[in-house]
Image (spheres, rainbow, N blue to C red):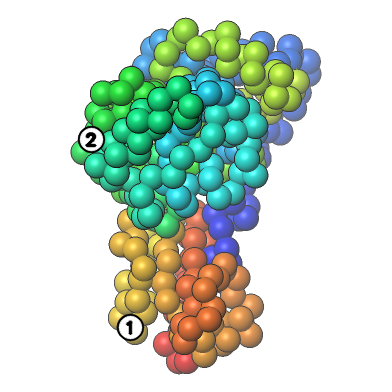
C-alpha cells in the first residue's frame, strides 16, 4: 500500500533492460553518441517539432532550473503558482541557476489568467526599482493533481505573450496530463504557446531521466553552456538516452501513464463511495483527500505509506499518488481498511 509518490516505485523492466543493453563496449561521452541522437530525433517527432532542442538531464529540478535559466534574466522574475514545485520543493534551484526571483500568482493550485495579468502589471508599475517580468512557469499536472485544459494553457500563454514573456511547462507528469486530456504533445506544448518543456520520465517508470525541450533553436549555446557550468552534463550520457529510448518505444510512456491514471480513478471512485471527501477535482494520478483520524490510524497500523498535511482537525489531509506499478490488490486492501474503519 505505497501511495507516497510515483517516484518511489520500481523502474520499468524495459528501461532496465535498455540500460543493460547500452552497457556494452565503448561510445563517445557527453551526448556524442548515436543513441542520444536517435532519442533526440524521436522526441522531435513525437512533439512534431523538427527544429526543437532536446537535452537529457537526470533530475526534474535540474530540468526546471536549467530551462528557466534560459528564459529569465537575473533582473527579472518568474511567475508561478504558490504551490508550484519550483517554489516549494527545489530549494531555490531556479533562482540559483537563473538569478531571477519567483513571484507567486494568486492563492490556488492553478494560475488564473486575470491574476497573472494583475501580477505582471504590478511589476511594471514598480518602474526601474522593481524586478522586471521575465517568464511564466506552469505545472502540468499541478501539485494538487489538477490538469490545465488546453484552453486554460492557451489563455495563460496569451497573457504572457501580450507582455513578451516566454512560458515554461513543468511536465514532471507530462504523460499523465496528456493521457487525461486525450491530446498530442504538440497540442499541450508549442501549439498552445509553450516555449520550453521539462518532459518527465522518472515519475513514470524511468530510473532517472528528464528531457528539456526548447522550441527556440537560438537557445542552444546558452543551454549547453549552462548545463555544463551547472554540473548536469553527464559523461556517460548513453545511459540517459537508453532510458528515454525504451520509455518512448511502443507507446510505453503513454501506457504507463494510463495505468497510473486508471489506478487513481479506481481509488477515487471507491473512496468516494464510502464518503471520503476530496480537496481538488482529481484529474490524473494524484489525489488529495480528507481522512478521518481513526481511518488514518488504521491505515498506518497496516503499513500504508502516504504523505499527510494539516493534522490539527478531525480529519487529516492525505496525498495519495498512484504510479504505473502499484498492484490492484494493494489498492483493494487500502480501500477495505477505509471501509471497515
Q: Is residue 114 left or right of residue 209?
A: left
- Residue 138 placed where, x, y %? 40, 39
Task: Tell me the tag on residue 1.
Answer: none
Number of numbered markers: 2
- Residue 159 placed where, x, y %? 26, 31
Q: Is residue 282 above or below residue 137?
A: below
Residue occupying image coordinates x 37% and y 24%: 165
Reading the image, the residue beneath label 1 is 275
Residue 242 visible in image? no
Q: Earlier in the sequence, mark 1 or mark 2?
A: 2
Q: Is residue 303 left or right of residue 149?
A: right
Residue occupying image coordinates x 48% and y 15%: 53
Q: Quadrant of the N terminus?
A: bottom right
Quadrant of the rendered image containing residue 47: top left
Residue 40 visible in image? yes
* 74 and 295: which is toward the camera: 74
Task: Tell me the tag on residue 155.
Answer: 2
Amino acid at each position: 500500500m505505497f501511495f507516497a509518490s510515483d517516484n518511489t516505485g520500481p523502474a520499468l523492466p524495459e528501461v532496465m533492460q535498455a540500460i543493460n543493453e547500452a552497457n556494452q563496449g565503448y561510445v563517445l561521452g557527453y551526448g556524442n553518441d548515436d543513441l542520444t541522437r536517435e532519442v533526440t530525433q524521436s522526441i522531435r517527432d513525437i512533439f512534431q517539432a523538427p527544429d526543437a532542442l532536446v537535452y537529457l538531464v537526470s533530475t526534474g529540478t535540474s530540468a526546471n532550473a536549467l530551462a528557466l535559466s534560459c528564459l529569465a534574466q537575473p533582473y527579472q522574475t518568474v511567475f508561478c503558482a504558490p504551490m508550484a514545485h519550483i517554489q516549494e520543493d527545489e530549494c531555490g534551484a531556479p533562482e540559483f541557476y537563473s538569478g531571477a526571483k519567483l513571484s507567486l500568482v494568486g492563492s490556488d493550485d492553478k494560475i488564473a489568467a486575470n491574476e497573472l495579468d494583475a501580477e505582471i502589471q504590478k511589476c511594471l508599475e514598480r518602474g526601474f526599482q522593481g524586478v522586471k517580468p521575465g517568464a511564466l512557469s506552469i505545472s502540468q499536472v499541478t501539485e494538487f493533481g489538477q490538469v490545465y485544459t488546453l484552453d486554460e494553457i492557451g489563455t495563460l500563454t496569451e497573457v504572457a505573450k501580450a507582455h513578451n514573456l516566454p512560458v515554461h511547462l513543468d511536465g514532471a507528469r507530462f504523460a499523465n496530463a496528456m493521457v487525461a486530456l486525450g491530446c498530442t504533445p504538440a497540442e499541450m506544448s508549442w501549439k498552445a504557446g509553450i516555449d520550453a518543456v521539462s518532459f518527465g520520465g522518472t515519475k513514470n517508470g524511468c530510473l532517472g531521466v528528464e528531457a528539456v525541450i526548447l522550441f527556440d533553436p537560438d537557445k542552444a549555446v546558452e543551454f549547453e553552456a549552462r548545463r555544463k557550468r551547472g554540473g548536469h552534463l553527464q559523461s556517460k550520457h548513453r545511459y540517459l538516452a537508453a532510458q528515454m529510448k525504451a520509455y518512448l518505444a511502443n507507446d510505453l510512456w503513454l501506457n504507463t501513464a494510463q495505468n497510473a491514471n486508471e489506478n487513481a480513478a479506481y481509488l477515487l471512485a471507491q473512496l468516494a463511495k464510502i464518503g471520503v471527501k476530496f480537496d481538488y477535482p482529481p484529474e490524473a494520478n494524484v489525489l488529495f483527500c480528507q481522512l478521518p483520524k481513526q481511518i488514518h490510524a488504521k491505515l498506518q497500523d497496516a503499513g500504508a505509506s502516504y504523505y499527510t498535511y494539516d493534522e490539527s482537525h478531525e480529519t487529516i489531509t492525505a496525498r495519495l499518488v498512484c504510479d504505473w506499478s502499484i498492484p490492484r490488490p494493494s489498492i483493494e486492501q487500502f480501500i477495505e481498511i477505509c471501509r471497515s474503519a
